[in-house]
Image: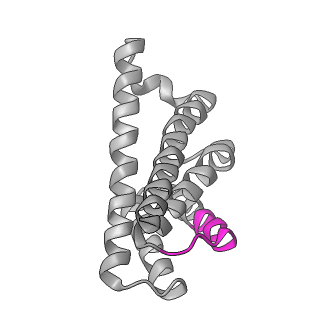
Amino acid sequence: MSIPILALILQGIPEGVALAVLGYLFTGTNLNWQRIIILGLSIAFTAYLLRLFPAGFGLHVLAVIFVIFIFLVYIEKASVITALTAAFFTEALLIVIETVILWLIILLNGRDVGFYSNVFLRIVVGWIHTIILFVIGYLVFCFKRQVKNK
């Protein structure tokens, strides 16, 4: 399923940045915002480009995991196991949050996911789980800071 360019800009890029922040936090790497933005853009454009092709469902998920993993290992010098765990956990968290949010919207709205094809609704729904990802990132950051100070 291709991503409309407006959804890429308004939802895909912020979601990619949120995933990058979580990847950094889960590896214990210092938050370097320039690199986080680069990784976030890489995530968003990887998903965008792969969804242009009639590839199997979920291929973009594996590609995003790979992009996060490679970036954390080669750019941030994280250990392979730590980076792989962070990449998988970050993407799994996104999938769970997206699923729960869509399920709640369908439950509350009484419609199937066909309404999700409207680009503006897609962006709004995307922002809900993107905000949740940023909140989780903030909570992880605060928890790590609190543990470090003890």
97 up-or-down from 86: above or below? above
Residue 15 appears in the rendering: yes
Residue furthest to the front in view is: 150
Residue 57 appears in the rendering: no
128 up-or-down from 91: above or below? above
**Is 47 part of what is drawn in magenta?**
no
Residue occupying image coordinates x 61% and y 68% = 36
| Colour option used | one colour
Residue occupying image coordinates x 49% and y 87% = 74
Residue sitting nearer the eye, 3 or 107: 107
Residue sitting nearer the eye, 123 or 20: 20
**Image quadrant assignment for residue 102:** top left
Q: Report the number of numbered marks.
A: 0
Q: Position of residue 82 (x, y in %)?
A: 34, 77
Is most of the magenta stretch helix, strand or loop? helix
Segment tinted magenta in the rendering: 29-42
Quarter of the image with the C terminus in it: bottom left
**Image quadrant assignment for residue 101:** top left
13 up-or-down from 62: above or below? above
Q: Position of residue 143 (x, y in %)?
A: 43, 56
Q: Position of residue 105 (x, y in %)?
A: 41, 22
Q: Position of residue 12 (x, y in %)?
A: 59, 50
**Is 36 part of what is drawn in magenta?**
yes
Residue occupying image coordinates x 38% and y 67% = 87
